[in-house]
Image (cartoon, rainbow, N blue to C red):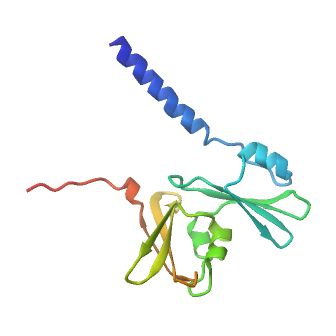
Amino acid sequence: MRKRALIVVFAASLALGGCAGLIRTQPALGDPVATVVSKFGQPTATFSEPGGQVFEYATGPMGQTTWMAHFGPDGRLARFEQVLTGETFAKIKIDVATKADVLRLIGHPAEHSYLALPDLEVWSYRYKENGVWNSMMHVHFNRAGVVKMMQNGPDPMYEEKRFFRD
């Protein structure tokens, strides 16, 4: 019995230790790049933009947030936002936005897939719809890399598994 209790305590401490890596101190507006990196770690991607740069902090493939740190020309944090939201997804324009536009706006997807019949590449993003529902947004691109449609729905990772028997 004591051995089982030790195993349970060990497993729980490992699980909590894993969560601790997700807890980060949010940077303050005006922080220099070095301070943001010390608080949030190395970015998962970086992008140039007119007048500065953007650091992506994606928590995928299982996470539901992607933070974008926007730095001005002085190298100081001008804006820091969680971008996997309905409001940000609404900025993606069908038949206009490209893969590069989507990457700069919401970052790298949690999953990639391909639909053969309509010949579309799909990037899927886990997020909390309205801050509540475990959802996935699917952004579909044609061969030219232009967004052709978007669909959202429940995240299958959180769906109850049901098995039917005869």
Q: Residue furthest bottom?
A: 95
Examine the image and state in which quarter residue 80 appears. bottom right
Q: Position of residue 45 (x, y in %)?
A: 69, 59
Q: Residue furthest left?
A: 166
Q: Residue at x 47, y 23 (%)?
A: 10
Q: Residue furthest top?
A: 2
Q: Residue at x 45, y 62 (%)?
A: 135
Which sits in the foreground, 29 or 32?
Answer: 32
Q: In the shown orientation, is residue 36 left or right of residue 125?
A: right
Which sits in the foreground, 58 or 130?
Answer: 58
Which sits in the foreground, 138 or 145?
Answer: 145
Q: Residue at x 56, y 32 (%)?
A: 17
Q: Is residue 87 above or below residue 39?
A: below
The quadrant of the image that shows the C terminus is bottom left
Examine the image and state in which quarter residue 83 appears. bottom right
User: Exactly how many numbered labels are in the figure?
Assistant: 0
Q: Is residue 92 above or below residue 41?
A: below
Q: Position of residue 149 (x, y in %)?
A: 49, 81
Q: Position of residue 144 (x, y in %)?
A: 57, 85
Q: Position of residue 61 (x, y in %)?
A: 52, 55
Q: Residue at x 86, y 64 (%)?
A: 72
The quadrant of the image that shows the N terminus is top left
Q: In the shown orientation, is residue 27 left or right of residue 157?
A: right
